[in-house]
Amino acid sequence: MNHINKQPISSLGYNFVSKEYLPKGKDEYYLRNIQNRSGIKYRSLTTAEIKTLEKNANSSDNWINVLVSDAFNPQLVKNCSFFGLVRIGKLEPYFAEFNNLRLPIGLYNSTIISCDIGDNVVIDNVNFLSHYIIGNEVMLVNINELAATDHSKFGNGVLKIGEKESVRIWLEVCNENGGRSILPFNGMLAADAWLWSKYRDDEKLLQKLKEFTDNRFDTKRGYYGKIGDRTVIKNCKIIKDVWIGSDAYLKGANKLKNLTIDSSADAKSQIGEGCELVNGIIGFGCRVFYGVKAVRFFLASNSQLKYGARLINSYLGENSTISCCEVLNSLIFPAHEQHHNNSFLCAATVMGQSNMAAGATIGSNHNSRGADGELIAGRGFWPGLCVSLKHNSKFASFTIIAKGDFPAELNIPLPFSLVSNDVSKNKLVVMPGYWFLHNMYALARNAGKYETRDKRKDKSQIIEYDFLAPDSVNEIFAALTLMKEFTARAYATKYKKELPAKEILKTGESLLDKKEGPLQLEILADGFENSGRKVELIKVPEAYSIFKELIVYYGINELIHFIESKKITDWQTLLKALPSKPERHAWKNMGGQLMPVSAVQTLIRNIKSGKIKDWDEVHAYYIRKSNNYHSEKMQHAWASLLELLKLRPGNFTKKLFLQLLHQAANTKEWMTKGIYESREKDYNNPFRKMVYETEKEMEKVIGPLKDNSFIKEQQASLNTFKEKVNSIIQQFS
């Protein structure tokens, strides 16, 4: 049986905070008075104003508790019921207009309970408006319920005085059993979510992060909901315990509950028709449209949910888009794209710059006895059409997966690989270096695309979008070792040779460095798939050669940036400026920001020791490391170059440097040519052309190849790179 509590009408709008939760000497309005920063000076209504209000079919339980500014116009308030303390700002005889919605300024046909209302606001047909502080020039039209409770957390994972731990909101990211749960808070970065979800064996760290979150918010009861200046809300049903920034636009939402919606004049957030959002935080500049369902979620700045997307128990990083599909229990780094109605992502850590194709099912736990499986995918993860993957699986950076139902768990440590399920021969096929061999256009375009689409107003935290960076280059080194090992074993198997363990890598290197022709070997890998079938590596010599060339290009490219930034004009100055004892350290991808493992360990140590005391100081640490990133990346590139060449710094000569500059220019030219040729295939493929009757029709539809703006940009970049190389060669010669 529903319990309907009946109280005197005279108490409606009062006692928002129970006396047991009020500090000594404070009334129920003390937090409201702190929150209201409008600067409006209020006065009591005059007798004439009360008469006018009553003539216009308005009522109040006590007109003494309706306060107004000096510029209040009672003629602009009609058919409203007021309860509790209501304070109203300036009302002037104009109409407000936004997106073709035109309504007179004023308060009409609404029930208003204990609210502060700013200047020149439109409130019309709001059936129940309770305990909100409303900014200037706000428009609230056709809303069933807009209310705040005394214990609202606005989507943050904290508790108010008197609440039990069981009501706290956790985000169960990365897997479904809650073992990596994190507490959401307004301002949370993907790096925070990763740090919290990753180091689960460090109880002291976890406790500190929980304390940081709890200490970030006041536990007192009695905070009002807020709606920022110039926000427009129309045709919505239920909005409860929602904090809304300025310049937001909400239209046609079904239910918004326990949310923070960050919005500002230069980063406006919008929520559209049919959306139901509960227990979440929406960052600046976000858009949520058309029937989206999101529960226990964090939507980072400048991201989008559209067309019936479902986002549950997940963190979605900056500059990402999810349309139509379902995402559960996942931690997703910035620049994620997922557009298709039947794609499904569950229990995953996806490290950004990712793209989920239609029909992809990332999250089958049918091979587990519990809901504790998970998947980890490095940057640039791209599962193709109708891919089905098993948990647990792990993928190196820029792995693309061909259409197929993959029957067992996968561990693909080779970056830039194409992974295929060859059903006819019952084997897994992995092509390392696929992007550079066959799809350079998409690889390069994506890097540029994500950079362009980074709409963050504050970019002091550096998010890496280049496909050659410390994380992917370290994976390339690991891949070179694996390819040498697997090649040597294939050679030994074919020719029935016994290779001592210490000779395996040396033999593989010798075989792969040969230039006579392709190896006639079936190269098989171990540990890539949890099955007894073959895992074949193809085009290994080509990938091996390309990977080595890429490390040289990466090293020389960073040295060129270093020379430019330090304004170095001669060889001796460069030698003195370069690190004398470079080491290629391990790095981590922390929410899109790359950081040396040693720096991550320092951060954790400082958090546990109390040297870092709150989330703001954690974020300041990210910024300091971002400020050092280009320098540390250069040191990593320098160490990588020397390691590949098997040189010490003292053996790195000017002659060699000049040769490598030429080689890097050739690599850049080869990459630019590959970009053009991979796109040119789309114009020459007869099956692409057959839908057009003439060449001109095709160009009208997809645009002439010669006018492709990205290809033009890449050609210009090549020319600039060559100019830099030639300039350095001339100076150093």
Image: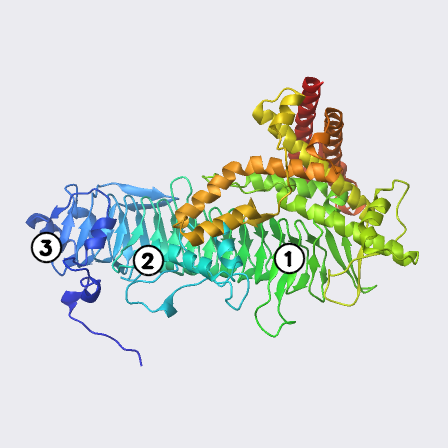
Q: CA distance from mark 3 to mark 1?
A: 62 Å
Q: Nearer the viewer, mark 1 or mark 2?
A: 1
Left or right? Give the position of 148 relative to 174: left
Task: Say which quadrant the N terminus sits in.
Answer: bottom left
Of the residues shown, which amino acid type is indicated by label 1?
Ala
Viewer-closest of 354 and 171? 171
Tell me the number on the disc at residue 64.
3
Regarding residue 397, the answer to whether it shows in the image is yes
Task: Say which quadrant the C terminus sits in.
Answer: top right
Left or right? Give the position of 54 relative to 146: left
**Residue, disc 2:** 143
Q: Residue furthest left?
A: 47
The image shows residue 454 at horizontal and vertical percentages of: 52, 41
Q: CA distance from mark 2 to mark 3?
A: 27 Å
Local crowd size for mark 3, using a 10 Å CA cut-off: few (<14), some (14–19), many (≥20): some
**Residue, disc 1:** 358
Q: Earlier in the sequence, mark 3 or mark 1?
A: 3
The image shows residue 485 at horizontal and vertical percentages of: 79, 53
Viewer-closest of 567 and 579? 579
Tell me the number on the disc at residue 224.
none
Q: CA distance from mark 1 to mark 2?
A: 37 Å
Q: Earlier in the sequence, mark 1 or mark 2?
A: 2
Viewer-closest of 309 and 346? 346
Q: Is residue 72 above or below residue 570?
A: below
Q: Residue furthest right?
A: 495
Kindly indicate the quadrant of the structure image that contains residue 206: bottom left
Of the residues shown, which amino acid type is indicated by label 3?
Ile
Query: Regarding mark 3 in the picture, which secondary structure is present there?
Result: helix
